[in-house]
Amino acid sequence: MADFSVDRTLDARGLSCPMPSVKTALALEQMDMGQVLEILTDDPVSKKDLPVWAQSTGNELLGIKEEASTIKIYLKKA
């Protein structure tokens, strides 16, 4: 995964689809262009949903990392 710094972390663990996407959209609204959001989720559906959502909204998926039961998704605000 490329080097980037995380500007904000959103803990969406315990939430199921579509809430991680909804919370992600709200978090990105409060961020500046080019900033990176780290989303922590334990909802496996988010692995498919968030990248598709990011692409449809013009935001950039930087990577997905899995650690134990937590999925970390990195998005850059466009």
Image: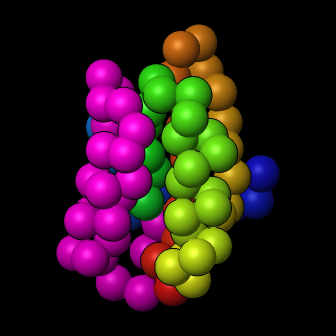
Where, by quadrant of the figure, is residue 74 drawn?
bottom right
Q: Reply above or below: 66 against 63.
A: above
- Residue 70 falls inside the magenta stretch: no
User: Looking at the image, which residue is at 30% across and 56% down?
Assistant: 22
Q: Reply above or below: 65 against 22.
A: above
Give x and y (percent) for residue 31: 29, 76
Where, by quadrant of the figure, is residue 50 drawn?
bottom right
User: Looking at the image, which residue is at 27% across and 63% down?
Assistant: 27
In the orientation shown, which residue stands out farthest toward the front?
18
Q: Reply above or below: 40 against 1.
A: above
Q: Which residues are magenta?
A: 12-36
Q: Is residue 68 left or right of residue 63?
A: left
Q: Nearer the viewer, residue 59 or 53?
A: 53
User: Looking at the image, which residue is at 42% across and 87% down?
Assistant: 33
Could you tell me if residue 40 is visible in this image? Answer: yes
In the orientation shown, which residue stands out farthest toward the right?
1
User: Looking at the image, which residue is at 56% across and 68% down?
Assistant: 54
- Residue 29 falls inside the magenta stretch: yes
Q: Is residue 15 left or right of residue 70?
A: left
Give x and y (percent) for residue 32: 33, 84
Q: Reply above or below: 51 against 68.
A: below
Give x and y (percent) for residue 36: 47, 66
